[in-house]
């Protein structure tokens, strides 16, 4: 691990303390994640959430509130920043917070883990309860059929803090990195395979209806190609529909493949797997950032794609789903997501 000007390096990865952000991932000499060269640029403006840890609750909460927790009829209003919804933890979410660390741990085989921590106070963006949160980035290489595979394991862990005035909190964490594994400024030409295209159906304001359906125009396990404009995807996919079985700590669950991607121009492959019950796949329609003084180019529409494993969107407000995001005192919230990339 090395640290220069607020950037911490571990193998082919670079991280910064704001938002415990993944700033760089070199695969075959190419940086496959979008971001800014100077860490200070993230603090100035990062509207697309490049590389950031998202919390307390990733994705959307309907009507800017948490309702019926801990008692039926309770309503906890939250900042509204996406139409009528609360998006990605509110206006000043965890992507904008300074995380302490990293603390480095090296295992006997040389694998390096960097741990960032954050103490989220009671009513942080109006979310009830105080939390102690850790994100661990474990960097390693694997050899597969003579090919060097770069691996990042992302592990989230949280508990109700000892000084919390509430004995509960809701949370659903993810990382919001954008990837571009091709050789152009667009994701056009990327080959995508989604093993299971079961879609968590949403309404006109992107809140789940409670129904599941197969995503139209895409077959499970069959590769398709991202074009200049289509398919335009910003949807949630279920890794399990057995919602009752989803625990608050999913790390003991099987890690399932969310998505597999490949770009023929570079030969770069990317596979994302997770213990989480769902993931959002977003093809970057609304990316729009200006060039920065640090030499970072402007990023436009479809400059990258996101794969965001997490709990079901709006789970806190759905009686049958809320157990997967409702953390109680004495319990541990946890999840694990693994990124693997290589050049074939």
Image: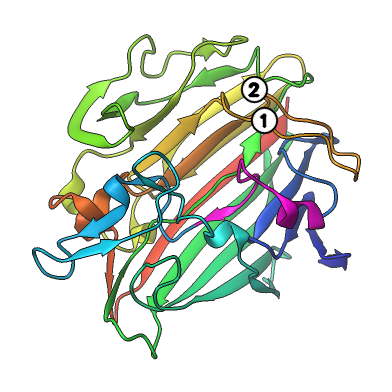
Q: Furthest residue to the left?
A: 72
| Residue found 84% across the figure and 41% down from its top | 292
Give the mark nearer the N terminus: 1 vs 2.
1
Q: Which mark is residue 288?
A: 1
Res. 11 in view: no
Q: Determine which quarter of the picture holds residue 191.
A: top right
**Left or right side of 205 for 153:** right
Front position in the image: 50 or 174: 50
Q: Determine which quarter of the picture holds residue 293.
A: top right
Residue range of the region highlighted in magenta in the rendering:
40-54
Q: Specify the color scheme.
A: rainbow
Residue that label 2 marks: 301
Mark 2: few/some/many CA within 10 Å (<14, 14-19, 20+): some
Tag 1 near tag 2, CB within 8 Å: yes
Front position in the image: 118 or 43: 43
Mark 2: secondary structure: loop
Q: Is residue 45 magenta?
A: yes
| Residue found 14% across the figure and 62% down from its top | 68
């Amino acid at each position: 691990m090395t640290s220069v000007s607020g950037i911490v390096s571990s193998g082919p990865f670079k991280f910064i303390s704001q938002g415990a952000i993944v700033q760089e991932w070199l695969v075959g000499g190419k940086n496959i994640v979008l971001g800014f060269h100077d860490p200070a640029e993230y603090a100035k403006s990062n509207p697309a959430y490049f590389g950031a840890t998202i919390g307390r609750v990733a994705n959307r909460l309907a009507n800017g509130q948490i309702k019926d927790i801990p008692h039926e009829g309770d309503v906890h209003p939250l900042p509204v920043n996406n139409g009528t919804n609360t998006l990605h933890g509110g206006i000043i979410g965890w992507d904008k917070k300074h995380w302490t660390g990293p603390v480095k741990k090296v295992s006997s085989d040389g694998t390096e883990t960097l741990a960032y921590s954050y103490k989220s106070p009671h009513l942080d963006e109006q979310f009830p309860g105080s939390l102690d949160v850790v994100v661990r980035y474990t960097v390693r290489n694997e050899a597969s059929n003579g090919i060097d595979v770069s691996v990042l394991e992302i592990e989230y862990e949280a508990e109700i803090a000892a000084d919390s005035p509430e004995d509960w909190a809701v949370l659903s964490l993810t990382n919001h990195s954008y990837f571009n594994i091709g050789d152009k400024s667009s994701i056009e030409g990327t080959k995508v395979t989604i093993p299971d295209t079961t879609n968590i159906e949403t309404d006109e304001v992107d809140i789940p209806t409670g129904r599941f359906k197969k995503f139209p125009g895409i077959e499970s396990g069959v590769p398709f190609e991202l074009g200049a404009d289509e398919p335009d995807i910003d949807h949630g996919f279920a890794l399990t529909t057995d919602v009752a079985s989803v625990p608050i700590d999913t790390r003991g669950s099987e890690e399932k493949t969310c998505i597999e991607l490949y770009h023929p121009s570079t030969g770069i492959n990317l596979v994302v797997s997770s213990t989480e019950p769902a993931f959002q796949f977003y093809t970057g329609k609304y990316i729009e950032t200006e060039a920065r003084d640090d030499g970072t180019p402007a990023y436009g529409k479809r400059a990258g794609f996101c794969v965001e494993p997490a709990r079901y969107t709006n789970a806190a407000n759905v009686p049958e789903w809320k157990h997967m995001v409702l953390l109680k005192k004495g319990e541990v919230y946890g999840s694990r997501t693994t990124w693997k990339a290589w050049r074939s």
